[in-house]
Image (tube, rainbow, N blue to C red):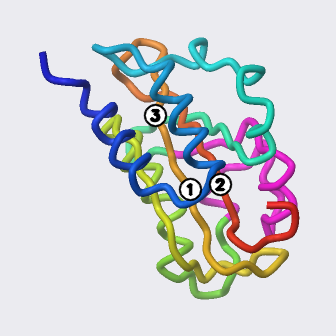
Amino acid sequence: MAPHPNLVAIDAALAAAGSRVLRDFLTYMRAIHPADRLPARSDFDPMAIPHLLSHLVLVQVERGVDSTRFLVRVAGEMVLRAAPVPLMNRYIDTSVNLHKTPDESEARIVSVRRQVADTGVTRHFYGKVNIPFRFNFADMEYAHCPLADDGETVDRVLSAFYYHGAPDS
């Protein structure tokens, strides 16, 4: 039997991960991933990875007739300190209006999660972004992982963020 497509994506992200935070997160996500379906929120135990909690964001996927929205339910301290806007209990698409003219980095905030929600496959990124975070850093790295209570339809996206060069990163 072929491995689940998300396990393949996690392995690829793990091979490309540049920070220990992302490697530890992806290793944990791989460990809780069933062989034949996506992990559910109930499979995720935050107490199993306490050293990562400040780097995590959990969003709820809300599917509408015309669009999919992402509501921030939990955001760790490091992410809250870095974010240029409040995040808690806000929709990501309304939180990214950081400039009068949104740029590609801001559009990616929503579109990458939409890809995860639509495909059920983890996405990893490592590079520069043009979003004015509260502190300067060289590069940003993240992984967005799908969670699905029914094992198939993504209802949450769990993400880990690492800000290379940021204080206390």
Quadrant location, the N terminus: top left
**Helix, strand or loop under label 3:** strand
Asked if the residues shown at circle 2 and circle 1 are in contact, with their CB atoms under 8 angstroms apart, the answer is yes
Image: 24 above or below 106: above
**Amino acid residing under circle 3:** Pro
* Residue located at (47% from left, 50% from top): 113
Image: 138 above or below 71: below
Q: Position of residue 85 (x, y in %)?
A: 81, 66
Query: Which residue carries the number 3 mark?
Result: 146
10 Å crowding of disc 2: few (<14), some (14-19), many (20+):
many
* Residue located at (79% from left, 61% from top): 169
**Amino acid residing under circle 1:** Tyr
Seen as rendered, the residue at the extreme bottom is 101
Single out the mark in the foreground, 2 or 3: 2
Disc 1 to disc 3, C-alpha distance: 13 Å
**Helix, strand or loop under label 1:** strand
Q: Position of residue 99 (x, y in %)?
A: 67, 84
Q: Which mark is residue 161?
A: 2
Query: Which residue carries the number 1 mark?
Result: 142
**Helix, strand or loop under label 2:** strand
Q: Nearer the viewer, residue 159 or 11?
A: 11
Asked if the residues shown at circle 2 and circle 3 are in contact, with their CB atoms under 8 angstroms apart, the answer is no
| Highlighted magenta segment, given as a residue range | 69-95
10 Å crowding of disc 1: few (<14), some (14-19), many (20+):
many
Please indicate whether residue 131 sits to the left or right of residue 5 in the image: right
Disc 2 to disc 1, C-alpha distance: 4 Å
